[in-house]
Image (cartoon, rainbow, N blue to C red):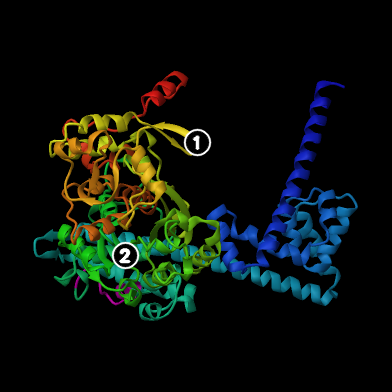
């Protein structure tokens, strides 16, 4: 056989084998989904599988319908090596067309989706009288013309909206100036002419907008009074702005600029509201602030975005979002000591001491960029009772309701790693389905503080939701294992601040110590997850880990160890940890003030989100919403951790590789 023939034959055989495997995999998927739907609703299954496994909602619908359309024809499908696309076409076909197509496959025919479509047309036409076929053709032509007209109308409205907003932006840029007392408008002849032209265009665009969207438009009051989607909220805001423009309420004469209480951001809100319902991808903010421009390697966020936080606690999540360019409109927290902590450190923050389940969030509707929350972790913690949704401390069930009221551009919720356990899959499915119903695509990912220069093993999960368009740009934060920090890096100066002469040796031993993690040796001792409850007598496993790392686990100490204490302790001396040390190990600034007694302070720290981990998530969300890219090595290390700034402190670096010789030496030293 010549080489070409041989190559063709080999390729044919391999492709047939792969096609058979693909068909078998598709059938296996259908069987799995069919079994799942017997246990849960399609709504919950769709959102859960989309979030956790990336299964597209349309694909899931195909698998769901398989059991009522193609069940029993598996052998025929295997014989024909039918692709997923053809199965999708067969499932959407009516029964007679599907039967004809299956007969063709059983007879050895290999169909494509267009072939199934042709069979459907033939079956339909064959069942009609000539008069019915002619009427069907006329109806199809009318529908086609209507679709073309609708598409043309939407396209023209899109162009007119973008033109209108650019005219508004030009008007502001050319005729508005900023002074200390607000906005001053130069109402010369050019301004009046431009204003009149925009007024006329606005009236025309409003009529077209109402013609295209019709009954989909709700007033903001209606939207605030009932459940609505993110897109419906955007339509409502855009409609309100068009009404203002068509009435001449912009630029002057009762518009935004003549009201001394309304600053330029209100005008920017008009521009943003209109652009939110267009296909526009780039434009220039008023006063030439960039928006939606692809900007690479930013060292810091270019503009401020707004946030609303639930269960703010001591403020770890808020500090991280603050460092990533977010300003909180409000922070909700009901613990008095945590509220006092927030107010002591950020007097200008609007801290609301209240039960989050009893607040009206519609006042923030459409005005918040990101809704965040470190919702209680105890229901899902492996160290607690793990009662999940049965725990009366479960507040996660309220998250979708609050999201639906606020309709932020994005949301971020943090919880313990246990939230991701299989036994809570049903609960997560309901939550994800509720988020999807409000118009959000959702993703969930895990992060560990130790991968961000923090000397603590603290795995957590983050649930992030955005509009599907924004989610398409979202990327989970990168991992920085080379920022490896140890207990010695974090605590050396504090361990020695009261004269303990062994502090430096203790710190160096922690840097060089070999710890087995998940069956793999790693150099450098970290503390295990700092908990909210201060242990009187620690559990044996926890006590053993502390003993291995040569510190004492128990209630927080009043002060750092002294040399006299070390002498009295003898060879078995193990220093304890102070609140200040735990604050370091959580990544809080040294000057951060914790209010309440020691037990309350320890509880606030144990419940907190590590600020730098929160900052990483916030930067990732910011990047997706504003279409920018950060220089992560710089942006995420601003601000630096306390021990990264201590004079003479060793910055975390890559740990040395563990080859056989070095590993044996390290183990012997340890």
Classed neighbour count for the residue bearing mark 1: other residues with Cα under 10 Å, few (<14), some (14–19), many (≥20): few
Q: Whole-percent x and y of residue 105?
A: 85, 53
At 79% from the left and 64% from the top, the residue drawn is: 121
Q: Is residue 172 visible?
A: yes
| Quarter of the rendering containing residue 61 | bottom right
Cα distance, mark 1 to mark 2?
A: 36 Å
- Number of the label disc, if any, that sits on residue 311: 2
**Residue 247 highlighted magenta (yes or no):** yes
Which element is circle 2 on? Answer: loop
Q: Reply yes or no: does residue 27 show up in magenta.
A: no
Q: Is residue 293 left or right of residue 649?
A: right
Question: Dividing the picture into quarters, in which one does residue 465 lie?
Answer: bottom left
Query: Can I make out residue 194 in this image?
Result: no
Q: Earlier in the sequence, mark 1 or mark 2?
A: 2
Q: Residue furthest right?
A: 107
Q: Which residue in the structure is indicated by mark 1?
A: 519
Pick out the residue farthest to the top: 661
Residue 495, given in percent of the width and then of the height, sits at 20, 39
Residue 270: image location, x then y, percent: 30, 66
Which sits in the foreground, 414 or 590? Answer: 590
């Amino acid at each position: 056989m010549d080489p070409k023939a041989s190559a063709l034959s080999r390729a044919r055989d391999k492709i047939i084998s792969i096609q058979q495997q693909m068909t078998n995999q598709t059938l296996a998927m259908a069987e799995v989904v069919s079994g799942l739907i017997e246990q849960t609703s399609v709504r919950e299954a769709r959102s859960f599988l989309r979030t956790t496994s990336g299964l597209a909602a349309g694909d899931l619908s195909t698998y769901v319908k398989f059991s009522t359309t193609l069940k029993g024809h598996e052998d025929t499908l295997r014989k024909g090596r039918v692709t997923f696309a053809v199965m999708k076409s067969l499932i959407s076909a009516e029964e007679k067309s599907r039967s004809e197509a299956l007969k063709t496959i059983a007879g050895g025919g290999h169909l494509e989706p267009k072939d199934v479509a042709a069979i459907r047309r033939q079956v339909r036409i064959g069942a009609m009288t000539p008069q019915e076929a002619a009427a069907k053709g006329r109806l199809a032509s009318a529908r086609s013309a209507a679709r073309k007209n609708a598409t043309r109308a939407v396209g023209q409205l899109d162009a007119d909206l973008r033109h209108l907003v650019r005219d508004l932006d030009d008007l502001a840029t050319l005729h508005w100036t900023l002074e200390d007392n607000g906005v001053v408008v130069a109402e010369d002849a050019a301004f009046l002419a431009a204003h009149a032209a925009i007024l006329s265009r606005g009236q025309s665009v409003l009529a077209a907008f109402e013609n295209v969207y019709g009954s989909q438009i709700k007033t903001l009051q209606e939207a605030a009074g009932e459940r609505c989607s993110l897109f419906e909220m955007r339509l409502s805001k855009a409609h309100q702005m068009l009404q203002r423009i068509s009435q001449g309420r912009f630029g002057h004469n009762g518009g935004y600029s003549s009201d001394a209480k309304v600053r330029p951001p209100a005008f920017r809100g008009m521009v943003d509201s209109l652009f939110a319902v267009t296909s526009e991808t780039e434009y220039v903010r008023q006063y030439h602030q960039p928006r939606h421009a692809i900007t690479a390697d930013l060292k810091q966020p270019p503009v401020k975005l707004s946030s609303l936080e639930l269960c703010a606690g001591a403020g770890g999540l808020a500090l991280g979002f603050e460092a990533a360019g977010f300003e909180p409109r409000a922070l909700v927290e009901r613990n008095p000591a945590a509220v006092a902590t927030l107010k002591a450190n950020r007097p200008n923050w609007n801290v609301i001491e209240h039960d989050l389940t009893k607040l009206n969030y519609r006042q923030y509707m459409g005005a918040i960029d990101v809704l965040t929350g470190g919702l209680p972790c105890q229901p899902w913690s492996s160290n607690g009772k793990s009662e999940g949704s049965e725990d009366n401390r479960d507040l996660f069930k309220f998250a979708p309701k609050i999201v639906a009221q606020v309709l932020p551009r994005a949301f971020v919720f943090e919880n313990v790693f246990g939230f991701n356990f299989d036994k809570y899959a049903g609960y997560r499915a309901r939550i994800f389905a509720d988020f999807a119903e409000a118009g959000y695509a959702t993703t969930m990912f895990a992060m560990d503080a130790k991968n961000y220069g923090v000397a603590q093993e603290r795995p957590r999960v983050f649930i992030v939701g955005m509009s599907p368009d924004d989610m398409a740009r979202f990327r989970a934060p990168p991992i920085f294992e080379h920022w490896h920090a140890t207990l010695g890096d974090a605590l050396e100066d504090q361990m020695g601040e009261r004269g303990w002469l062994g502090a430096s040796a203790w710190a160096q031993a922690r840097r060089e110590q070999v710890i087995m993690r998940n069956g793999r040796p790693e150099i450098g001792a970290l503390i295990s997850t700092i908990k909210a409850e201060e242990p009187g007598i620690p559990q044996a496993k926890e006590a053993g880990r502390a003993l291995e790392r040569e510190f004492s686990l128990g209630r927080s100490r009043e002060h750092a160890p002294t040399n006299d204490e070390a002498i009295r302790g003898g060879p078995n001396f193990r220093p304890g940890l102070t609140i200040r040390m735990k604050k370091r190990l959580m990544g809080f600034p040294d000057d951060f003030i914790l209010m309440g007694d020691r037990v309350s302070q320890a509880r606030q720290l144990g419940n907190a989100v590590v600020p730098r981990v929160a900052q990483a998530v916030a930067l990732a969300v910011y990047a997706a919403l504003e279409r920018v890219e950060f220089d992560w090595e710089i942006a995420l290390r601003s601000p630096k951790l306390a021990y990264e700034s201590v004079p003479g402190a060793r910055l975390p670096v890559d740990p040395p590789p563990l080859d056989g010789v070095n590993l044996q030496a390290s183990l012997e030293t340890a």
